[in-house]
Image: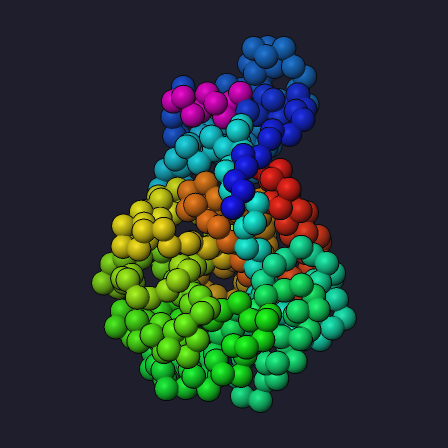
C-alpha cells in the first residue's frame, strides 16, 4: 500500500490568510466563543483588501471554524451538538491528510440499468466498489456481470437474512445467497449487518451472522456497518472480535433546522478517534471504512439532512482520513426515492465525487 501526504494547493491571498487565521485558532490565540478581529482590523494587520478578508472568513465559515453572530461579530464557534471543535481536525488544512491512494471508493445501491447505461457516468466515475441489496428474484449474476464491465467490485447485502423491523436474524438463509455469487470474480464480499443497534441486534447475533458468512465463503471479507457512533463499543452498540473483517461506520453530519440553512455536526472530532481506538484495541489492524453523506432528506421530524456543498463533502472525507484512519469511503446514496435528493438526481454531486476520486487516487486530495 502506498501512502502519500497530499501536497498543498497553490495559494490565493485569501486562502493564505485563511490558513494564517486557522493556525492562530489552533494555537489557542482565539478560544471557542471568542470574537476574532473585525474585517477592518484584519485588513490593516495583514495589509490586504476587504475582498481578501471577506473571502478568507467565508472559507473559515465553510470549514465550520467561525460563525457570524448578530451584534457581536465573527466568533470561533462550537458544535451545534454542544461539543467544541477540536482544532487538531484542521491541522490537515495546511499539510493535507494522510491516506492510502488505493482507498476503496464505494457507491451504494446503483441499479443494474444505471450500470448498463452508464448513467451520470457511474462506470467512469473512478469508484472501485458498489454495495447492493439482493433479495427475492434479483438476478445477482447479471448484476455482477454489469458491475464487472464497469470495473466495480460488489459488496452484497442480503435483506432476507435479517428482519430489521423486528431485529430477528436468519443465519440459515445466508449460504444459499452466498452460493449464487461467491464464485464470480466481481464479488468482493458481504455486508452482514447494517446499524444493528437501531434494530436491537445483539453482539451474539452479529457474531452468528459473521460465522454464517465465513462458513459459506471463507475467502471473502465480511463487513459490518455500524451507526450510532457515540454509543459504539458500549452495551447499546457493542463491538467484539468475530464480528467483521472490515468495520464500516455511517455518519451524516450535514443537517438543516429550517430546510434551507446548513449546519455541520462536529461530533466527529470526538467520536471518530474514540471509535478508531476501540477497533484497534479489540481487533488490532482491522480496516475501518466510513460512509459519508451526499443526500438530502427533509422528511424526518428531527435530524433533517441537508444536501452537502462540495466543501462539506470534502470535509466529511477529510474527517474520515484524519480522525478515523479510514481506508475506504462509501458515498450514501446513489438511489433512494424516499429521499429529497440522491446522487441519481444530482449530476453535480456525482461530478464532485469524480473529482474527489481522482484526487484520492493521485494523492492530491486535501
Q: Residue at x 32, y 51 (%)?
A: 284
Residue 54, percent from left and from top: 63, 26
The answer to whether residue 240 shows anywhere in this view is yes
Q: Which residues are magenta?
A: 20-28
Q: How is the structure coloured here?
A: rainbow
Q: Residue furthest left?
A: 235
Q: Is residue 97 left or right of residue 10?
A: left
Residue 294, percent from left and from top: 58, 56
As displayed, is residue 107 above or below residue 230? Answer: below
Q: Residue at x 61, y 81 (%)?
A: 141
Q: Main secondary structure of the magenta part?
A: helix
Query: 334 or 224: which is nearer to us?
Result: 224
Q: Residue at x 33, y 66 (%)?
A: 243
Is the C terminus in the top left, top right, bottom left or bottom right quadrant? top right
Q: Residue at x 71, y 63 (%)?
A: 123
As displayed, is residue 130 above or below residue 74? Answer: below
Query: 66 or 175: which is nearer to us?
Result: 175
Q: Residue furthest right?
A: 117
Query: 39 or 343: which is nearer to us?
Result: 343
Amino acid at each position: 500500500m502506498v501512502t502519500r501526504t497530499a501536497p498543498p494547493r497553490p495559494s490565493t491571498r485569501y486562502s493564505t490568510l485563511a490558513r494564517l487565521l486557522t493556525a492562530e485558532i489552533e494555537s489557542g490565540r482565539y478560544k471557542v466563543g471568542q470574537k476574532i478581529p473585525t474585517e477592518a482590523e484584519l485588513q490593516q494587520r495583514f495589509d490586504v483588501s476587504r475582498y481578501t478578508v471577506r473571502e478568507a472568513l467565508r472559507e473559515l465559515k465553510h470549514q465550520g471554524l467561525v460563525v457570524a453572530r448578530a451584534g457581536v461579530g465573527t466568533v470561533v464557534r462550537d458544535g451545534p451538538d454542544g461539543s467544541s471543535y477540536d482544532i487538531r481536525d484542521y491541522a490537515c488544512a495546511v499539510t493535507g491528510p494522510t491516506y492510502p491512494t488505493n482507498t476503496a471508493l464505494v457507491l451504494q445501491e446503483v441499479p443494474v440499468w444505471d450500470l448498463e447505461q452508464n448513467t451520470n457516468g457511474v462506470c467512469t466515475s473512478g469508484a472501485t466498489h458498489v454495495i447492493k441489496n439482493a433479495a427475492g428474484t434479483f438476478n445477482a449474476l447479471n448484476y455482477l456481470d454489469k458491475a464487472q464491465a464497469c470495473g466495480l467490485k460488489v459488496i452484497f447485502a442480503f435483506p432476507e437474512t435479517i428482519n430489521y423491523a423486528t431485529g430477528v436474524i436468519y443465519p440459515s438463509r445466508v449460504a444459499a445467497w452466498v452460493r449464487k455469487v461467491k464464485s464470480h470474480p466481481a464479488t468482493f464480499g458481504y455486508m452482514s449487518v447494517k446499524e444493528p443497534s437501531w434494530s436491537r441486534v445483539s453482539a451474539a447475533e452479529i457474531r452468528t451472522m459473521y460465522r454464517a458468512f465465513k462458513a459459506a465463503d471463507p475467502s471473502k471479507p465480511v463487513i459490518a456497518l455500524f451507526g450510532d457512533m457515540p454509543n459504539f463499543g458500549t452495551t447499546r452498540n457493542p463491538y467484539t472480535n468475530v464480528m467483521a473483517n472490515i468495520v464500516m461506520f455511517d455518519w451524516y453530519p450535514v443537517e438543516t433546522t429550517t430546510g434551507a440553512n446548513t449546519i455541520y455536526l462536529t461530533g466527529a472530532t470526538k467520536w471518530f478517534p474514540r471509535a478508531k481506538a476501540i477497533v484497534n484495541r479489540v481487533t488490532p489492524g482491522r480496516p475501518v471504512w466510513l460512509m459519508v453523506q451526499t443526500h438530502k432528506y427533509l422528511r424526518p421530524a428531527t435530524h433533517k439532512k441537508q444536501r452537502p456543498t462540495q466543501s462539506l463533502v470534502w470535509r466529511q472525507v477529510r474527517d474520515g482520513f484524519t480522525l478515523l484512519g479510514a481506508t475506504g469511503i462509501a458515498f450514501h446514496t446513489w438511489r433512494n426515492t424516499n429521499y429529497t435528493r440522491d446522487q441519481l438526481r444530482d449530476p453535480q454531486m456525482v461530478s464532485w465525487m469524480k473529482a474527489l476520486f481522482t484526487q484520492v487516487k493521485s494523492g492530491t486530495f486535501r
